[in-house]
Image: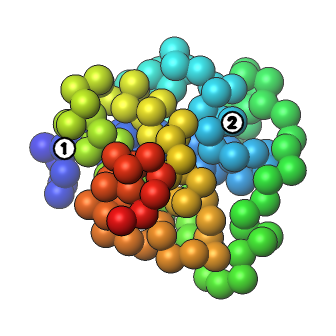
Amino acid sequence: MQGRELQKNNDLFFTCSLIAYIARRTKNKPVDVVDALGEATIAKIYELADVYHSDNIDRVSDDFIEECHIQQGNFDNVAECEYSVPTHWDIGKVYKRLILMVEAKEQKGVVNALLAAYHSKVSDLIEDYNSSFYYDNPQTIFATYENDGIPE
């Protein structure tokens, strides 16, 4: 335990925030970034998050964009947002909480839970910044995940 939460939970938070950051910089949906990074690279980011977190996020994201050949897309939920845009850190926290709940319930390991969360229908709801879904409490977001993306 370091600070208010377990170090590995903080590593997951950084991993999810980096995915959001790369998605915004490349105008891709986060699931497309997850697919481009792949399971092995995501596991590497998660394991070395404390090192990456101490570096400049622009440089870290540039390295992974180049290494994984992530192309520019046309998904721009930031430009489409009519309200206050959540930061990549805000969205990273939403995904972190969801992934921890998925991992605890499904016992599939953090990286596999991450893959499941980003590939779920609830990811589209989280990425719609014109709704308030990403602000919902973590239990509601998890219940929606379990309900195949249909809010209760």
Quarter of the figure that contains the N terminus: top left
Q: Which amino acid does label 1 sit on?
A: Leu
Residue at 34% x, 46% y: name it: 146
| Left or right relative to 48: residue 81 | right
Label 1's element? Answer: loop
Quarter of the figure that contains the C terminus: bottom left
Q: Is residue 151 above or below residue 95?
A: below
Q: Where is residue 75 in the image (x, y as percent from the top left)?
A: 79, 53
| Left or right relative to 37: residue 143 | left
Q: In this view, does 107 lie above or below 121?
A: above
Q: How far apart are marks 1 and 2 (CA)?
A: 28 Å
Q: Which mark, residue 100?
A: none
Quadrant of residue 67 within the rendered picture: top right
* Outermost bottom residue: 83
* Outermost left residue: 1
Q: Position of residue 130 (x, y in %)?
A: 64, 76
Number of other residues with Cα within 10 Å of mark 2, as a class: few under 14, some 14 to 19, many 20 or more: some
Q: Which of marks 1 and 2 is in front?
A: 2
Q: Which mark, residue 6?
A: 1
Label 2's element? Answer: helix
Residue at 79% x, 24% y: name it: 69
**Residue at image mark 2:** 32
Q: What residue type is labelled 2?
A: Asp
Q: Nearer the viewer, residue 129 or 1?
A: 129
* Outermost top residue: 40
Residue at 43% x, 73% y: name it: 135
Number of other residues with Cα within 10 Å of mark 1, as a class: few under 14, some 14 to 19, many 20 or more: few
